Image (cartoon, rainbow, N blue to C red):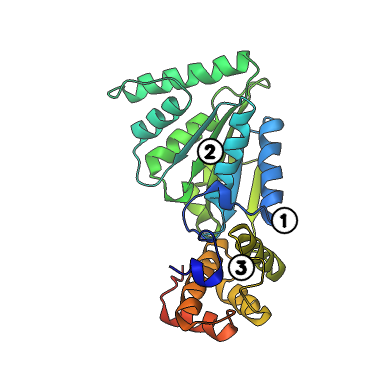
Amino acid sequence: MYQSHWGLDRKPFRGRLDLHFFHESPTHEEALARLHYLVEEHRRLGLLMGATGSGKSLLLEVVAKRLRRVGVPVARANLTGIEPAEFLWQLAAALGINPAPDATGARLWQRLTDRIIEHRYQQLPTVVLLDDADQAAAGVLDQVVRLAQFDPVPQSRLTIVLAGRHERIGCIGPRLLELAELRIDVEPWDAADTAEYLNLSLRRAGRDAPAFAAAALARLHELADGVPRRVNQLADLSLMAGAGRGLPQIDAETVESVHHELGVIEV
């Protein structure tokens, strides 16, 4: 544990999905604004694209929490490794339908679409947030296409957001790309964003003095390519290495050695 060496109350950097650690950088602020625009303008389908570790899943979690707070029904699902019937079951459960465990695909579809129409009559949006869409099976993507084309009346308030890696956007399929009304790209942080995030996270964890020298901050940003998950990995491992070496402040050499020797994963 390195907290005592750096005078921290807790670990400042975590790899898991944790809303307490969300840093609303300019690129994430813009993405959130565009996600809310999709819902407020009743747009049917949007794409949220970015590199692995850019914060797409966290953005979906943040927007889901904000929408639920104002009473908007939200279904959120990860599409990696699930089958079409399981996909429909998850959406139905998330929208409060309480489906039977053995419900058929046809029955799930009927109940799901009935709920969406019910929300329309109540003038409530229905928001479906689907993560890792570029990893979805063909049958699941067919169901997403079917859902995106359901109830095409002007009064419809169904909004679907598909998140995935920009280099795999073609895996979502041509029909969904044709139906998409807005593409939102989550860009990497610039050097100032990375430095602000690191210093703010350390302050929140109890340390007022900078733990990273200016050169270390610049090198960490360069090695992480401005990708938030990689920034987290390198920062956490650098603090660990610096504490082990008894350093008063992390230098660029420590960041460099951590990157090469402590196994930061390149994705």
Nearest to N terminus: mark 2 or mark 1: 1
Q: Nearer the viewer, residue 231 or 56?
A: 231
In the picture, the disc for residue 26 is: 1
Amino acid type of the residue that numbered disc 3 sits on in the rendered structure:
Gly
Task: Tell me if mark 1 has few (under 14), some (14-19) or many (20+) residues whose alpha carbon lies within 10 angstroms of its own.
Answer: some
Q: Is residue 114 above or below residue 25?
A: above
Nearest to N terminus: mark 2 or mark 3: 2
Nearest to N terminus: mark 3 or mark 1: 1
Residue highlighted by disc 3: 226
Residue highlighted by disc 2: 129
Q: Nearer the viewer, residue 7 or 175?
A: 7
In the rendered image, the residue lying farthest to the left is 102
Between marks 2 and 1 in the image, the one whose residue lies nearer the viewer: 1
Q: Is residue 98 above or below residue 12?
A: above
Instruction: State how far apart marks 2 and 1 are (Cα).
Output: 22 Å
> Which element type, helix, strand or loop, lies under badge 3?
loop
Q: Is residue 259 above or below residue 70?
A: below
> Which element type, helix, strand or loop, lies under badge 1?
helix
Left or right: 99 as drawn, with respect to 2: left
**Residue 139 in picture, x, y percent from top left:** 38, 39
Residue drawn 66% across and 72% down?
210
**Residue 15 in picture, x, y percent from top left:** 47, 58
Residue drawn 56% across and 26% down?
73
Residue drawn 39% across and 34% down?
87
Task: Tell me if mark 3 has few (under 14), some (14-19) or many (20+) residues whose alpha carbon lies within 10 angstroms of its own.
Answer: many
**Residue 159 in picture, x, y percent from top left:** 60, 32
Q: Quadrant of residue 42?
A: top right
Instruction: State how far apart marks 2 and 3 are (Cα).
Output: 25 Å
Amino acid type of the residue that numbered disc 1 sits on in the rendered structure:
Pro
Q: Nearer the viewer, residue 110 or 16?
A: 16
